[in-house]
Image (cartoon, rainbow, N blue to C red):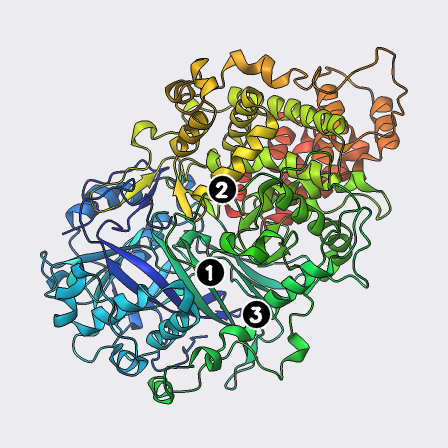
Amino acid sequence: MEPDEDLDPHTDDLPLRANTNHILVRHYVLDLTVHFDRKVIGGSVVLFLEPCSGSGTTAEDDAGAGTKEAGVSQGAFVCRSRGVDEAEDGTKGLGETPTRKEKKFGARERDAPESQALPGSGSAQTAAETENIQSSHSWETTSDGDFTLSLDCCDLDVTKVEEVDVTPVSATSGLQPEVASEWSGVSSVNPQAAFIQSLISMPSSRWRQKLQLFLLCSRALGAQDGGSLHFRRDRWSLQVRKKGVPSPQEFPRALRICYETRPAGGSVRWTKDQDDRVCVYTAGSPINNRALFPCQEPPVAMSTWQATVRAPSECVVLTSGEEPTVPIEDGDTRSLIWHCYVTMPMPASTFTLAVGHWHQVTAENPPALERGARDETDCDEAAKLCAGPGEWAPADLMSGLGSSISEVVKGPLLKTGSGDQTARSDSALRCSSLEDEGPFSVTDYSGMADDGISCSHGDYPCRFTEQSARSQRVIPHRVFGPVGLLQKAQMGVLKLLPRCLAAAHTVLGVHPFPRLDVLIVPAGFSSLGMASPHIIFLSQSVLCAGSLGSGENGLSLCGSRICHEIAHSWFGLVIGARDWTEEWISEGFATYLEDIIWAQAQQLSLQETAEQSDLKALLRWRRLSDELQNSEEALQILRPNMENTGRASESGSSTVKHALNPDKTFMQVHYLKGYFLLRFLASQVGEKQFIDFFRVFVKKYHGQLILSQDFLRMLLITFPDIERKGLTLSAIYADWLDRPGIPKVVKWILLSQSHQGKGRKRKRTEPKVNYKEVTSEQLVMLLELLLEEEELSGATLRALQRTYNLQNQDAEVKHRWCELVVRHAYTRAYGDVETFLVHDQAMGVYLYGELMVQEDPEQQALARRCLSLVQEEIDQSARRVVEEMVL
């Protein structure tokens, strides 16, 4: 049957088309080649599938399941990437009679205005839609009674879909089918299905062998009889059928899809770095990874993956893999081959890839941190993890499988490590830690007693159960960036990272992931940061401001942003939202926790922590109030699906409300409103108790997907007094999650000096103030207050600039300074505005609007000049918004 027949989303909603209630991808094996000359990534992905035991289940039922020149792929098969017209089994679907779904869904998209088109789909909407229809010759001749696998997919040119014959691997693996009773009927009819099921079900203690068998299966030949499957690709999905197969239980368990990305695909970003070198990275856009590889995007489709990436030898490949790999040379080309894998099931949207001419940021000596020293014990533990690349090399994983297994692969197995690769060893992974000379800070949450909570997720190697991980305050980490920014990255990111990691461990406990890479991404990156498993993207806007000797104050934005992204390891990654519309579960929590972690990293006193927290709350309140006054109410709701949150159609398909709405892209409601909800809840139970509760919540729900009620119900059970005071689940829904705006009754609580009288006494004498020595947050507050003034003279602005050296402050300060310059037409500082719009593109979008609304010819000319300077590198969504303002 046609999936999602009743799906008719609004043009700003994102459809999730994968039928995850029928069948699930449990593991992906990607084999990719990065082609810099054509700006495409080509190769294949092999999907290992498991049919669901029942049908018609909802996302809620599955909650506890465990919670990126034509190229030639290496191995036993060849997927030569061609244009669609040349494809062996794929043609453009021009002239075909539209199906009922196309008439209902596709026509609406074809008629959509360009401003609502998919990012990267091109300016000619009709042409783009034409290219997005592709199918095999025999698609229309297959029976409507055949089962259809529907995958999320867009902006990909698919050349072939085939069933993989894993018989040679199963025959020599020594792995006996270990299938549950519901699969017993399958094993007698289809031994390949039984083998794949046994492979998927292998216990986590055998993860190395499991990964090796997945790799061998991925390189097996296509099935000889009926191996080529029928497929159809429309704008949002790839649909696959096998003739005569009526149910997911009889559908092939291993599929290979050969494809290429498109240069302007929405999931990948081809651009130039700050050294003017071409690079590519996954964009983290609303469509996530469906334009990088065909996948199941709904969060409930938790899976593991492994990837082989070929890239030019001068490039560095960074991925969301558990161990840093040592690349090996490809004997047939000048490329290097990189490998990555994960053993923790996660949504496909969390796979991350970045390839470019970056350099690792190094320090001549281990960092001499002001209040700590190197912890050799932690380093010993980290060194064991750093030794990782060879640990899952095929030679090690092959033990016990028999020598004949290598005959399955036509060609050498790809090794992940080699003793000859010492020049590229990962000894540079920094294992530095902090050794306390006393208590780490005044507030230390790490002493919470063990509550006896055990893991309730699916079986995978879990760090929360490892004793060594509990004491590992600083995980191994590396920092990468372009040559021109290495010094700033060294003085900022590399200096702060171990302190922030240690502080996060103090606040939240075990680090969910064994290592961390940080990449300073190109100037056109659309936000200040993005966290993925094992890797963080940081904008150049957060790097240390001013001169390298300007002290700690210049690091405030960098430090708080690092803490925000590190917090996502707990909230956003190891615990994820089961419904994408509940972004506040990730962003609100990270915004709330960044203040606490950053205060720990700075080792502030209780009073200093409270003052910094109150000031940041005030700034966020002003920002949120402004946003609520200038946005449509539908975009202010934290739970837009309300009582239907987490529910999907019978097949598992759904839509993400407002995901493609261009106005939502630049809003922070989910960050700020979610932050204030958590701050309000903390005021009701006490901050120390609230953080203790976070740690217990993480212990219970790590490795799973949650909805708002999972957190709130556990909170109300833990603190029954607040419910007796009227703070019920339904009241929180009504006041905070299901309506626009924010409860006015809590404004006084949020912004009052809530810590006054609780261990903090104030003297009535007037303090001595040095008005030049202010924090960046205080300077932001000063500039915001000045923005409310009707008139400011040039002399005042000149004195302000000279006193505080505003052009050399962090990006938050410079943003307000540029607003002042534009508001009062201070022409002497127009150069500061141009510099900001060119170098801080993620923050300057609405500054273009300020330049245009003044109707000052010189300012409008400045806006057009800045757009012309960045139009090739600015984020595509941001460019459309800016072009609407300027052109």
Helix, strand or loop for disc 3 = helix
Q: How many labels, in total?
A: 3
**On the picture, is 519 further left or further right than 574?**
right
Q: Please rate how many residues cluster around mark 3, counting C-alpha atoms within 10 Å: few if below 14, some from 14 to 19, many from 20.
A: some
- Find disc 2 in the rendering and name its residue: 698
- Find disc 3 in the rendering and name its residue: 388
In depth, the one of 656 and 819 nearer the eye is 656
C-alpha distance separating marks 2 and 3? 27 Å
C-alpha distance separating marks 1 and 2? 40 Å
- Where residue 464 appears, as percent x and y from the top left, is 51, 52
Report the amino acid beneath label 2: Val
- Where residue 295 appears, as percent x and y from the top left, is 35, 57
**On the picture, is 301 further left or further right than 849?**
left
Is residue 824 visible in the rendered image? The answer is no
Helix, strand or loop for disc 2 = helix
Q: Please rate how many residues cluster around mark 2, counting C-alpha atoms within 10 Å: few if below 14, some from 14 to 19, many from 20.
A: many
Between discs 1 and 2, the one toward the N terminus: 1
- Where residue 299 appears, as percent x and y from the top left, is 37, 47
Report the amino acid beneath label 3: Gly
Quadrant where the C terminus lies? top right
- Where residue 322 appears, as percent x and y from the top left, is 52, 62
Closer mark to the observer between disc 2 and disc 3: 2
Helix, strand or loop for disc 1 = loop
Taking 734 as reference, is 513 above or below it?
below
Report the amino acid beneath label 1: Pro
Is residue 697 visible in the rendered image? The answer is yes
- Find disc 1 in the rendering and name its residue: 263
Between discs 3 and 1, the one toward the N terminus: 1
Residue drawn at 82 percent across, 33 percent down: 828
**On the picture, is 659 further left or further right than 649?**
right
